[in-house]
Image (cartoon, rainbow, N blue to C red):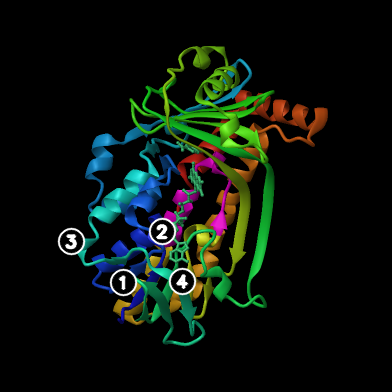
Amino acid sequence: MKTDVAIIGGGPAGLMLGHLLRQQGIDAVIVERQSADYVLGRIRAGVLEKVTVDILKDLDLADRMNKEGLPHDGFFLADGERLIHIDIAELTCGSQVMVYGQTEVTRDLMDAADSRGLEIVYEAKDVAIHDVDSDAPYLTYLKDGVEQRLDARFIAGCDGFHGPSRKAIPDSVGKVYERVYPFGWLGILADVPPCNDELIYANHSNGFALASMRSNTRSRYYIQVPLDEKVEEWPDERLWDELAVRLGPEAGSRITRGPALEKSIAPLRSFVFEPMRYKSLFLAGDAAHIVPPTGAKGLNLASSDVAYLSRALISYFKEGKSDGIDTYSQTALARVWKSERFSWSLTTLMHRFPDDGDFGRRMQVAELDYIASSEAAKKSIAENYVGLPL
Ligand code: FAS
Ligand code: PHB
C-alpha cells in the first residue's frame, strides 16, 4: 500500500491530522494498534482550547460539540474556604474554553473518516518504522496475523507517550526533558450533575482536587493521590467523602453522589522530546510531549502541533515548499514549552508536595493571595488557560 503521509496512532492527534490532510486532497492512512472501541474507552481530557474548537469547525465536524458542549467563561481556584474566580472571558476580551470530552472529539473524528476517505487500520500490531532517514520511508505491521507494508513520503508519529516513533530518532539526535511528579490523579466519571457550573481547582491540606464535568448530567472529578495508591483502595463512598472535604464546604455540600462509570489513576509528568522532526519523520501530540493535566493542555497541545504540521505538509504537497516542514519542530516547540511552563506552574501552585515543608506552603499561600488581589496575575492565568495564540 502507498500513501503520502503514514500516520501512526488513531488518537486525537492522528485523527485530526488525517482529516486536515484529506480535506486538502492529500492522501493519508492511519495505523492504530488498538480497536476503535478501545480508543473510545479511554477517558481523558475535558476542556478544549480555541485551537481544538477551530480544527473541528474548519473540518465542519463541530455540530455535536456546538449542541452538546458547554462554553465556559471562567473557573475557580479554591484554597480551603477561599474561592478565587478567574473570569477568563472578561480577562481575555471574550475568549472561552469549551467543555466537551476528548472521547466525544475522537468519536466525531472517527465517525467522519470513511465518508472523507481517511483510511484507519485498527488492531495493527507490531508497527515498525523503516528508512525515516530517506525520502521513501515505510511502515510494516501485522493485520490479522499477515504482515503489511505501507510506503509513504512522510511518517507522522501520533502514537502517544508509549508509541514507537520517538524511538526511531537516533539517541545522538534526540534530547529528553522530564520531571516526574511525586503523586498521581485518581479520576472518577459518574452520571451525576456537577457540583458547580464552572470548574474548581482546589488546594487542600489533604491534597489537590478538581471538580469538572462532561455535561450538565455527567461529572468528572479528580483527587491527588500518592504514586503507590491503588484504585481498589478507593471505593466510591470514600472518594465522594474526600472530594466533599477537599472542594470546601460550599461546593462540597452540592456534590451529588453516584456509582463510578470509570475510575482510574494517572501518573503526572512534564516531558518534552526534541526535536519534533527527524528527516521524513514528524512527531505530534503525546508522542513528543506530556503535561500534568492541571492546565488542561494535553489534548490542546496535540491540536496546535497538528495545526502547524498540517499547514506545513499541505504547503509541501500542494505548493512544493519545504519551509513549513523545515521549521515545524522549532515552531511547535515554542508553543509546547509555554504550555509546559503553565501546566508545571499551576501544578506546583495547587498540589501539596511531600518535600515542600512550611516554606513551600507559605509560597503557595502568598501566590494565591497575590492572584486574589491582582488583575494582572489573574489575566496571566486566564490567557494561558484559554490557550496562547498559534
Ligand atoms: P493518544 O495517546 O491519545 O493517542 C495515541 C494513539 O496511538 C493511541 O490510540 C494508541 O493506541 C496509539 N498507539 C500507541 N502505540 C502504537 C503503536 N505501536 N502502533 C500503533 N498505534 C499506537 N489531557 C488533558 O488535557 N486533560 C486531562 O484530563 C487528561 N487526562 C489524561 C489521562 C490519561 C490517563 C492520559 C494517558 C492522558 C491524559 N491527558 C489529558 C492527555 C491526553 O488527553 C493526551 O494529551 C491526548 O490523548 C493526546 O492525544 P494523542 O497525541 O493523539 O495521543
Ligand atoms: C477533565 O474534565 O477531565 C479535566 C478538566 C480540566 C483539567 C483536567 C481534566 O485541567
Type of amino acid at the residue the image marks with label 1: Ala
Of badges 2 and 4, the one in the foreground is 4
Q: Is residue 324 visible?
A: no
Residue corresponding to mark 3: 115
The answer to whether residue 247 is left or right of residue 389 is: right
The answer to whether residue 101 is left or right of residue 172 is: left
Q: Earlier in the sequence, mark 1 or mark 4?
A: 1
Magenta stretch: dominant secondary structure = helix
Identify which residue is drawn at 67% across, 60% down. Answer: 177
Q: Is mark 4 within 8 Å of ligand 1?
A: yes
Q: Secondary structure at mark 3?
A: helix
- State the separation of the CA atoms marked 2 and 1: 13 Å
- State the separation of the CA atoms marked 1 and 4: 20 Å
The answer to whether residue 248 is left or right of residue 7 is: right
Q: Which residues are magenta?
A: 289-306
Nearer the observer, 251 or 107: 107
Residue corresponding to mark 2: 13
Residue corresponding to mark 1: 28
Of badges 3 and 4, the one in the foreground is 4
Quadrant housing the N terminus: bottom left
Task: Determine the image quadrant of residue 337.
Answer: bottom right
Identify which residue is drawn at 38% across, 46% down. Answer: 41
Whether the residues at callouts 2 and 1 have beta carbons within 8 Å, the answer is no
Q: Secondary structure at mark 1?
A: strand
Type of amino acid at the residue the image marks with label 2: Ala
User: What numbered label is drawn on residue 126?
Assistant: 4
- State the separation of the CA atoms marked 2 and 4: 20 Å
Task: Using the image, determine if residue 179 lies above or below residue 146.
Answer: above
